[in-house]
Image (cartoon, rainbow, N blue to C red):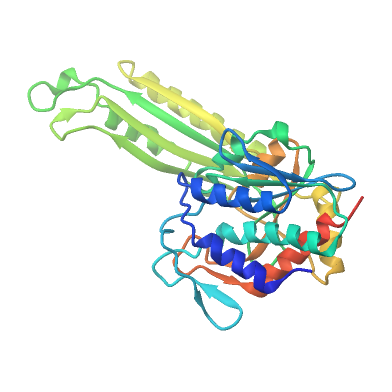
Amino acid sequence: MINRDRIVQTFLELVAIDSPSGEEDAIAAELERRFRDLGLEVAQDAAGNVLGRRDGEGEPVLLSAHMDTVEPGRGIKPTWDGPDIIRSDGTTILGADNKAGCAVILEVIQSAIEDGATTRPIEVAISRGEEVGLVGAANMDYSRVAAKVAIVIDSGGPPSSIQGQAPYHYTYDIEVHGRAAHAGLEPEKGVPAISIASEIVLGLPQGRFDSETTGNVGKIQGGLVRNAVPDHTVIQGEMRSMVEEKVETLVSKTKRHIEGVQEKHPAARIDARFHTAYPGYTLTPDDPAVKLLFPVLEELGFTPNPHPVGGGTDGNVFRGHGIASVVIGRGGYNQHTKDEYLVIPEMLECARVVEGCVRRIP
């Protein structure tokens, strides 16, 4: 049986360990220890993700969360707002994103042990660097993952709040190589990288194109001093769409635009690199993750509420590796802000739903 006091205590102990993205060693070691104490075969892979397995019957299910948090996330001091809500003290985030997900997974396994319950084989993947581009999931050792279905516990709201659609995501890095010169003495000898980059930026996808498609120029960096013609500029940005063909069309248009700017400035060199950050998806009734999760939700009295979400999660990356994944809420709100809070009854509901999934033997 899911134990309220224990899962809350686990959550509070986890948020007491600072784990901003890139500094996850302490929380990784603690999670590895806790899973090992629960009898799992567990170790970190080469990327530092914590991967574990517990034997069971039937087809395995992967339970996933991430261990890193955004800034400001050091020295977190949780405060109580009544009996059912935990908030940050207003100086940091709370870290429910995603220490609550980690606490849920630990509690589900502990509950199964106490109940002597038969479960599916449970595989656990706690990733690093999720908040800075799904880095851990992208570099995970998938040879250690046998599951073909995953419950990703990494969304806001109750467990019935499901990420039913997520975008295809492309990123790009454009480098403009010009030629330096003294800006006052002989500017005509220079090839101004910033000026050329500005022509590129004006033709890049920016803003919302429709309800499914967006583009953004996120970073421009170039030049060293004000009195020198800059010889190098970097542009970084992204494009997303729920429809793969739409984002691919944006990529093609962007490439043609860059080629046009290059033709206008033959003395410069423009290098553009495009990368598929992760694939998108749309949940369908015959999806293996839907067929596992939705009946459990309904049996527990919830109405599944799948809806589109403009961001990506580890679930996107898992799907790119052939693992049908569904992302559910775990009771957190106002993520990535100092106003973040956790609704404990919803975290408990999440744990009961996940428990129902792992105990549903095919």
Residue 282 % position (x, y):
73, 48
Farthest residue, direction right: 362
**Residue at coordinates 33% horizontally, 20% vertically from top-left?**
265
- Horizontal side of 204 relative to 283 (left or right) equals left
Number of marks in the rendered image: 0
Residue 179 in sight here:
yes
- Nearer to us in this view, 19 or 138: 19
Farthest residue, direction left: 185
Residue 25 % position (x, y):
50, 45
Residue 106 % position (x, y):
68, 58
The quarter holding residue 175 reads top left
**Residue at coordinates 61% horizontally, 36% vertically from top-left?**
45
Farthest residue, direction bottom: 82
The quarter holding residue 330 reads bottom right
**Residue at coordinates 68% horizontally, 52% vertically from top-left?**
37
- Nearer to us in this view, 153 or 29: 29
Which image quarter is the N terminus in?
Answer: bottom right
Q: Is residue 131 above or below residue 235?
A: below
Residue 274 % position (x, y):
52, 29
- Horizontal side of 147 relative to 34 (left or right) equals right
Q: Is residue 280 above or below residue 333?
A: above
Residue 160 in sight here:
no
**Residue at coordinates 83% horizontally, 69% vertically from top-left?**
300
- Nearer to us in this view, 9 or 47: 9
